[in-house]
Image: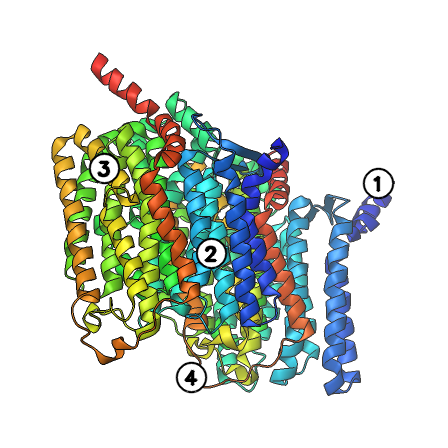
Amino acid sequence: MSTGLDNSMLTLVTFIPLAGALLLVVFPRRDRDIRVFALVVSLLEFVLSLHLPVHFQRGQAGFQYEVNNLWISNPNIHYHMGVDGVSMWLVVLTTFLTPLCVLISWKSIHERVKEFFILLLVLQTALIGVFVALDLFLFYFFWEATLIPMALLIGIYGHGRRIYAAVKFFLYTMVASMFMLAAILWLYAKTGTFDFVSIQSAIHNGQVENFAGAATWLFLGFFIAFAVKVPVFPFHTWLPDAHVEAPTAGSVLLAGVLLKMGTYGMLRFNLGLFPEQSRANAWWVMILALIGIVYGALVALVQPNMKKLIAYSSISHLGFVVLGIFSFTQAGLDGATFVMLAHGVSTGALFMLAGILYERRHTYEIAEFGGLASPMPVYATFFLFIVLASVGLPLLNGFIGEFLVLSGAFRDRAVYGILGATGVIWSACYLLWMYQRVFYGKVTHEVNLSLPDLSGRERAALWPAAAAALVMGVAPLLWLNAIDPAVQNVLAPFAQLARKMVGR
Amino acid sequence: MNNANDLTQLIPQAADYVRILPEIVLSIFGMIVMVLDPLMDERRSQRTLGTIALIGSLAALAATLFQGQYPGLGFWNMVRVDSFSVFFHFLVAAVTAVVILTSYEYMAVQGIRAGEYYALVLFGAVGMSLMSSAVELVLIFIALEISSISTYILAGFRREAAISSESSVKYFLLGSFATAFFLYGVALMFGATGSTSITVIGNVLRSGHIPVLAYVGIALMFVGLGFKVAAAPFHVWTPDVYEGAPSPVVGFMSTAPKAAVFAVLLRIMFEADAPGRVWLIWVVAALSMTLGNIGALVQDNVKRLLAYSSIAHAGYLLVAFAALPNNGIPAAMFYTASYAAMNVGAFAVISHIGGKGERYVTLEDYEGLGRRSPLLAATLTIFLLSLIGIPITGGFFAKFYVFSAALQSNLVGLVIIGVLNSAVASYYYLRVIVVMYMREAREEVPLPPIPVGLGTALAISLAATIYLGVLPGRVLDYAARTAAEWAR
């Protein structure tokens, strides 16, 4: 491949959805054409993004496909993008889920269709931007940019309490990211650059004045912004509201990608910029993660609302990711990254499945269903498959990541591993129990007897997700061999840190 | 021989006139409007007079660019054309043009006689322009009065609405009070330093001993100017005046005179090197941000909401004044420009939606706007996002520069207050967006199509807002050069 294409690859991947959205602005209001157009754009985008893993130099640490141009000279902001093994897969996850979102919204969105797909595509650009930005300013810019389309998607196309949910979502994230902005500004004031790599090396070489005094605060400034996004335990209250009220596509992207912005941020910025502070604060972060795992699972267990159940299960699963990241072990971080991807696929699929049911019955209440396996056998099969993937059945995608995370946590401190492992059991409990209540037994409500099974379009949306869940479970190395070097790179300062401590 | 020399010194040279060329142009066009007004049929006059005024403001813009090539002092060191004054002249003229474009439709809908209106807008612009180039406190006072008196009258232009007259009277009474404070300050400063020239004052104050009188003088001048920019605790007039005054006028007086007064403040604070600057401003900035934002949280009237927001924004802007000059001056200049762009735009939208008699100005009236007029709603959304300070809008970089200037001067406390305030502020701007997109209109309020004039005004402010948000470098570099000029 020519280097010219490689250089502009990330720019293309990031901005093609935005270009599509701009074209949609002047598109005539013919709903069907708009949907087809959005689908074509998102598929094109997906195919294009596959260029990244295909031509990725595996086994090589550091960033690839880098572009670095001066954007604004004062302040010194660069258009600096690049991906490593972690962020590359998150980009592909985003481009993978978006066409599925388009398909799943085909019929459920029938008012203000044009605006919906514009927002969806703008959101996609912002999400990809978050993962590829290597300039702290650019990162913050995309970070904030995700907020508006997502809040609008929830607020305009959501269900009953949508406005409350949208505003809560917006404010939580906005307030939290202000702390991150303050930390970024501080770093800029002291180093004169926003460049992630430059700041990292400046910190590493001790060239930042007053860093020792401010470091913990900076760590916290970043951490709060990410923790709200993940969400880590006490900051999670916006998530169930946002999920329950969001339209299906919104939930898919919210759970599938937006939450990963937080864990990705922790991995990249908290660990990358502040290794010492990360280590010093790891104990309470891990405790919060464990609380999240268990608490999320327990609350999910008692939810009468299917979507809320999946939302709380996300809190639990994302707890694994945080646990893995702050174990500072190779296995833990590998696993955390893999859980991010696997959770994106399987929870995205779960939300699609819930949305499909909602389209038919306009409710998420589990009690409204029962015995659905007989009127909707294909649907039931897909659902079971995804549930098993999400539960962590070996050979499906949920297993590898959680296994790695737990082994990493175990090496860090056995009790973390043991407590974390209970989360796996819990997830089996709540998901399988929900499955049983929805699909088995007799059909208790007359209306459910005549529910149509999956249509071709719905199958087209579910097949890729199911296939991905299987492939990821069978051949995880395809993903891990790109993730591994990136993680090693992140962990390098920790090894030095450990050596320093032993030397003392 | 000697006598003759004195005589030539007393007669203004051609160069002197170039130094006030934009003011001359604006005055001439203002007078043309006034002369033509009684000669024309009332119905037809609105458009014609508006166009003359528009040409006037554009001519002033051109005059500013021309004048910018000949920097220097004029009129016995009373005015100075430098890149700083050119910046603010440009800003004032541009805002004036946009406001006139907005007023076309507004005047027709409200049935307001256009003659004096356009003339007063132009005369106001004369004062505002002069403020930014005057380097002599007495001349600044005169310019301030020219600008203020025009805006007092403009505020009362909705003659059939009692609230408008109230607004005008309130603004006038409190405003005259404030200018009196300013004049006192000037007098005391003269007593303390023996001069009213900012340059001389600066030299005296820098030379070492600072008389107590100078502190009092600065404080009093600051009270007067603080009133004009609606900084807390001199802000109480703002919501009432903004609510009553015609919307395009609010767009005008919340941006152009403010920018001009900030220019004066910059000159006094930095060029004259005002003593006790940092703490005075620290307190006022923190108060303005906090009181403005808290006040805005509970407003249901969009104009009042933006009035409180303008108080808060005056606070953010003042943060830059507490910073060191080489960071603070460019940050403040950039902020005035981007605030002008977004606020003029926002009020242009408001004046269109308001309808006859400005009936539709509460949040409820904005319900379902996203569906009724997607274009208008999207435009207003961008202005509001800019006011929040979301990236790729001018508002973001404005805040960004201000806060990073403050951080570089180690004003961490003030930055934290500012950042927290921005977070709070996002709530009430968001409320407007929520109402527009997420609620349905209770009654179908008719919304006329967007006329050409308004459309142009919106396009200009939108383009400026986005330009400042995507490529802020050029404007900031320009502003930074100004700061460097002063430092020399």
Callout 4 and callout 1 share a chain: yes
- First in sequence: mark 4 or mark 1? 1
Q: CA distance from mark 3 to mark 1?
A: 99 Å
Say which residue label 1 marks.
B2
Say which residue label 3 marks.
A403
Q: Indicate left or right for B189 with A357 as reference.
A: right
Instruction: Tell me, for residue B442, which label it has, or none.
Output: 4
Q: Indicate left or right for A256 with B462 as reference.
A: left
- First in sequence: mark 2 or mark 3? 2
Using the image as rendered, state which of residue A298 and residue A161 is in the foreground: A298
Residue at position x 44%, y 25% in the image: A60
Callout 2 touching callout 3 (CB < 8 Å): no
Q: CA distance from mark 4 to mark 2?
A: 36 Å
Chain letter behind tag 2: A
User: What colour-coding does the image apply?
Assistant: rainbow
Say which residue label 2 marks.
A99
The amino acid pointed to by label 3 is: Phe
